[in-house]
Image (tube, rainbow, N blue to C red):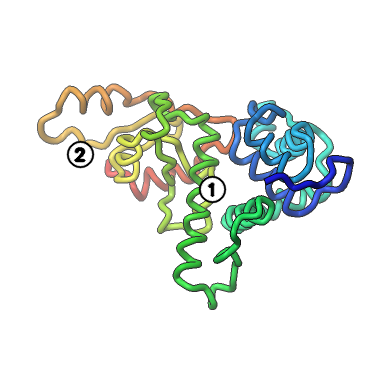
């Protein structure tokens, strides 16, 4: 849907900032450019040029300490509103996941039935389910984007076989359900093994295999897909690298050594 709004210079509205930050979360830094189809579509919907949207997303990149630590700099010129939203989003990523999706719905003109966020005391089960789905969708998109849609262990790039798994389980820490630094992109087999505590990653981000997987007959597939990767380093992305403290929790509380 085309907004019909002028592309002349004007201030950024709240929904526009939410969506520009969402673009930043859900695209690798190298794809924050004016020819990215997602950026082109958003630009059309909010009545701005693709270059303006790409620049705003790059302004947010300049606020990312993970990129700074790797010597990657976004565009300078982040506004006070940019900085305030960045801080608010990182203080409550679950709120941001839900609110940015509602902004997308408002801007695109989709049916807004069941979209209002209400106080927890008034939430219906339907609203709880819808918001949980929004959070999970945001988390998955952000994690897979950080790892450039490839498995952090094997390099597999088939989207149908990739999962975005939580390091600290969803049920343990509600505050980190939407946090992409609490996630790793893994192929379905390694994701299941990680979730079940049958593999983990040491303090140097090398894969460790549980002794439980050495029990009983060991097939060639078993050997190739698990033992052959033992000791291999996890590929660390520039954006949203896995939190070492979360991995420490996984080693101590989930992994079955």
At 69% from the left and 32% from the top, the residue drawn is 68
Looking at the rendered image, the disc whose residue lies closer to the viewer, 1 or 2, is 1
Q: Residue at x 48, y 43 (%)?
A: 140
- Left or right, residue 79 beside residue 199: right
Residue 27 left/right relative to 212: right
Q: Residue at x 50, y 67 (%)?
A: 127
On the image, the x and y values in percent for residue 84 come to 76, 52
Q: Earlier in the sequence, mark 1 or mark 2?
A: 1
Helix, strand or loop at mark 2 = helix
Q: Is residue 72 above or below residue 7?
A: above
* SS assignment at label 1: helix
The alpha-carbon separation of the residues under discs 1 and 2 comes to 34 Å
Residue in front for this viewpoint, 84 or 110: 110
Can residue 238 be seen in the rendering of this structure?
Answer: yes
Quarter residue 37 falls in = top right
Q: Residue shown at 77%/31% (left/top)?
A: 51
Image position of 193 with respect to 175: above or below: above
Q: Position of residue 193 (x, y in %)?
A: 30, 39
Residue farthest along the right direction in this orientation: 9
Q: Residues within 10 Å of mark 1 (few under 14, many from 20)?
A: many
Q: Are marks 1 and 2 in contact (CB under 8 Å)?
A: no
Q: Is the C terminus in the top left, top right, bottom left or bottom right quadrant? A: top left
Say left or right for 57 vs 116: right
The residue tagged 2 is 212
User: Going by the picture, which residue comes out furthest to the left?
Assistant: 217
Report x, y in % for residue 90. 64, 51
Residue 138 tag number:
1
Q: Residues within 10 Å of mark 2 (few under 14, many from 20)?
A: few
Q: Nearer the viewer, residue 186 or 67?
A: 186
């Amino acid at each position: 849907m085309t907004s019909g709004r002028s592309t002349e210079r004007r201030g950024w509205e709240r929904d526009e900032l939410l969506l520009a930050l969402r673009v930043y979360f859900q695209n690798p830094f190298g794809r924050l450019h004016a020819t990215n189809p997602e950026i082109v579509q958003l630009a059309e919907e909010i009545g701005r040029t693709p270059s303006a949207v790409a620049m705003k997303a790059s302004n947010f990149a300049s606020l990312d300490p993970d990129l700074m630590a790797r010597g990657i700099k976004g565009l300078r010129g982040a506004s006070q509103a940019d900085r305030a939203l960045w801080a608010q989003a990182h203080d409550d990523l679950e709120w941001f996941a839900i609110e940015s999706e509602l902004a997308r719905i408002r801007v695109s003109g989709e049916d807004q039935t069941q979209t209002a966020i209400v106080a927890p005391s008034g939430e219906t089960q339907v609203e709880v389910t819808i918001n949980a789905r929004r959070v999970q969708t945001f988390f998955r998109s952000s994690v897979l984007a950080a790892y450039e849609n490839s498995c952090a262990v094997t390099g597999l790039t088939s989207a149908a076989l990739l999962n975005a798994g939580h390091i600290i389980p969803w049920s343990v820490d509600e505050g980190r359900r939407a946090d992409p630094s609490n996630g790793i992109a893994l192929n379905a087999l390694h994701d299941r093994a990680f979730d079940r505590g049958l593999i983990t990653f040491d303090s140097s981000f090398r894969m460790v295999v549980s002794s439980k997987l050495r029990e009983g007959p060991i097939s060639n597939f078993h050997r190739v897909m698990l033992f052959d990767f033992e000791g291999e380093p996890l590929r660390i992305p520039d954006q949203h690298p896995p939190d070492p403290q979360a991995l420490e929790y996984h080693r101590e509380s989930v992994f079955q050594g």
